[in-house]
């Protein structure tokens, strides 16, 4: 049979090194951009690192370097050029006219990936919102008709300008509609979260840089079935599963991965996806021990978490993929530098027992030993204590239930209403 599949898009990847970016970091970001392109099925036909002293308002880079890039793209038979910087609408338009092929930047590439990965209604809305917000300022240069406008008295409009205004209004209406729909979706998520909080089950969120192995970890320790691939942004939608431990049940959520230079509009658009982490009692911060850039990835994740206001009572630092370290000396260094960290391999299972023990310790920290008298009408609270507390004894006096238990911190305020005494 004849293969009718369309050939993969071929792209020339352009890295940018400015005065604030060391060459090693610029090359790392360029390699990351190449991985992002691969995630979208784009074949890299070449890379070029450009040293940028001053941003050219018309082309981002100087005219001589722009000609060099275009000639390299033509020689490599590239279908597109992808820049590791955000380009202004006019820079993108001018470069496309010069090259005669598609030109886009890191922001647009990430938006395309998110659009291809979104599964739930909420994620799809967030992606569409980011796409429309990105495209709106680029409409000005979308119509060649405008280049043929004729002169006339002030305020004269031709068909090109009318079409532009109509499209602007249409996109603005779509943005407003999606924002309103997202409000409703978030209300539903908030209601679901409040139901979980009323039940009193503690929550843990797995956070970290994209492709650190978060989804694989959820699959391994919570018997989930989340898509896990060796790609950037293999999954976008938060997935929550129950996990049983010796100290009780915990709700474990896998969140979207972070990445350096994430477009700000996507940070805002995906804030709702990260709200599951915002209310977590425990943050399980996963890093790829085999990635030489893991320190920068750690910093990136912390900065984004701080930006969107995510904190937790307990944080567990986890280094994954230690099975990929043929030389164990970097691992020994990490263990000395981060003695509180846990080192695991989701692939082989090494260290997972230690991680589970750390989660259980976090669940039981802050417990208080109490004696409670609970009336029969509130017996549902007794059932909750048996699920989430450590019951030391139970007795009955009339219709009341006398409970001696170690109460987790999350239930202390409710338990105080039934307290007979607090024990040290």
Image (cartoon, helix red, strand yellow):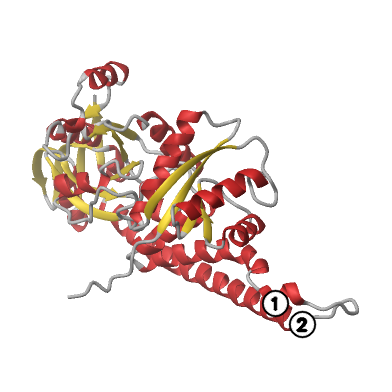
Residue 124 is left or right of residue 373, and the answer is: right
**Left or right of 55, for residue 31:** left
Quarter of image, res 156: bottom right
Where, quadrant-wise, is the N terminus in this rendering? Answer: bottom left
Q: Residues within 10 Å of mark 1 (few under 14, many from 20)?
A: some
Does dot 2 land on a helix, a strand or a loop?
loop
- Number of callouts: 2
Is 264 located above or below residue 287 in the figure? below
Measured as percent of width and height from the top left, residue 294 is found at: 35, 31
Q: Which element carries disc 1, helix, strand or loop?
A: helix
- Which residue does the numbered mark 2 point to in the structure image? 158
The label on residue 145 is: 1
Which residue is at 17% across, 56% downward? 225
Mark 1 or mark 2, earlier in chain? 1
Q: Nearer the viewer, mark 1 or mark 2?
A: 1
Residue lying furthest bottom: 159
Could you tell whether 168 is left or right of 15 in the image?
right
Residue 279 percent across, percent down from the top left: 37, 47
The Cα atoms of the two marked residues, 1 and 2, are separated by: 9 Å
> Quarter of the image containing the C terminus?
top left
Q: Disc 1 vs disc 2: Cβ atoms closer than 8 Å?
A: yes
Residue at 17% over, 54% down: 224
Using a 10 Å C-alpha cutoff, classify the residue at mark 2 as few (fewer than 14 neighbours), some (14 to 19) or many (20 or more): few
Q: Nearer the viewer, residue 375 or 360?
A: 360
Is residue 424 or residue 257 the one in the foreground? Answer: 257
Residue closest to the eye, 139 or 11: 11
Taking the view exactly as shown, the residue that stands out farthest to the right is 153
Residue 44, position in %: x, y?
A: 38, 50
- Closer to the camera, 281 or 6? 6
Residue at the image position 39 percent from the left and 33 percent from the top: 298
Residue 362 image label: none
Q: Residue at x 21, y 53 (%)?
A: 241
């Amino acid at each position: 049979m004849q293969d009718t599949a369309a050939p993969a898009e071929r792209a020339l990847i352009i890295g940018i090194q400015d005065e604030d970016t060391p060459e090693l970091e610029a090359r790392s970001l360029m390699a990351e951009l190449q991985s992002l392109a691969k995630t979208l099925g784009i074949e890299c036909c070449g890379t070029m690192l450009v040293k940028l002293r001053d941003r050219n308002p018309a082309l981002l880079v100087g005219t001589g370097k722009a000609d060099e890039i275009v000639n390299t793209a033509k020689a490599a038979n590239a279908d597109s050029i992808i820049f590791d910087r955000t380009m202004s609408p006019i820079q993108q338009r001018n470069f496309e006219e010069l090259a005669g092929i598609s030109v886009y930047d890191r922001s647009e590439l990430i938006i395309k990936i998110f659009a291809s990965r979104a599964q739930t209604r909420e994620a799809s809305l967030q992606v569409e919102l980011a796409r429309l917000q990105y495209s709106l300022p680029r409409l000005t240069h979308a119509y060649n008709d405008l280049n043929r406008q004729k002169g006339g008295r002030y305020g004269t409009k031709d068909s090109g300008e009318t079409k532009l205004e109509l499209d602007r209004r249409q996109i603005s209406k779509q943005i407003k509609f999606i924002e309103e729909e997202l409000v409703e979706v978030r209300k539903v998520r908030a209601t679901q979260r409040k139901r979980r909080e009323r039940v009193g089950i503690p929550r843990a969120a797995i956070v970290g840089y994209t492709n650190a192995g978060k989804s694989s970890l959820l699959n391994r320790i919570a018997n989930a079935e989340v898509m896990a691939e060796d790609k950037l942004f293999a999954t976008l939608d938060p997935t929550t599963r129950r996990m049983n431990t010796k100290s009780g049940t915990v709700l474990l959520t896998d969140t979207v991965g972070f990445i350096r230079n994430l477009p700000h509009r996507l940070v805002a658009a995906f804030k709702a996806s990260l709200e599951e982490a915002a209310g977590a009692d425990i943050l399980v911060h996963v890093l790829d021990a085999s990635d030489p850039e893991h320190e920068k990835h750690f910093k990136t994740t912390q900065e984004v978490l701080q930006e969107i206001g995510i904190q937790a009572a307990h944080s567990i630092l986890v280094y994954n993929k230690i099975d990929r370290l043929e030389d164990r000396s970097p691992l020994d260094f990490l263990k000395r530098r981060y003695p509180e960290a846990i080192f695991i391999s989701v692939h082989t299972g090494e260290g997972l027992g230690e991680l589970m023990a750390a989660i259980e310790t976090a669940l039981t920290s802050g417990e208080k030993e109490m004696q409670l008298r609970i009336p029969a009408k509130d017996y549902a609270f007794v059932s909750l204590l048996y699920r989430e507390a450590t019951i030391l004894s139970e007795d009955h006096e009339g219709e009341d239930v006398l409970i001696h238990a170690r109460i987790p911190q999350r239930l202390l305020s409710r338990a105080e209403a039934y307290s007979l005494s607090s024990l040290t």
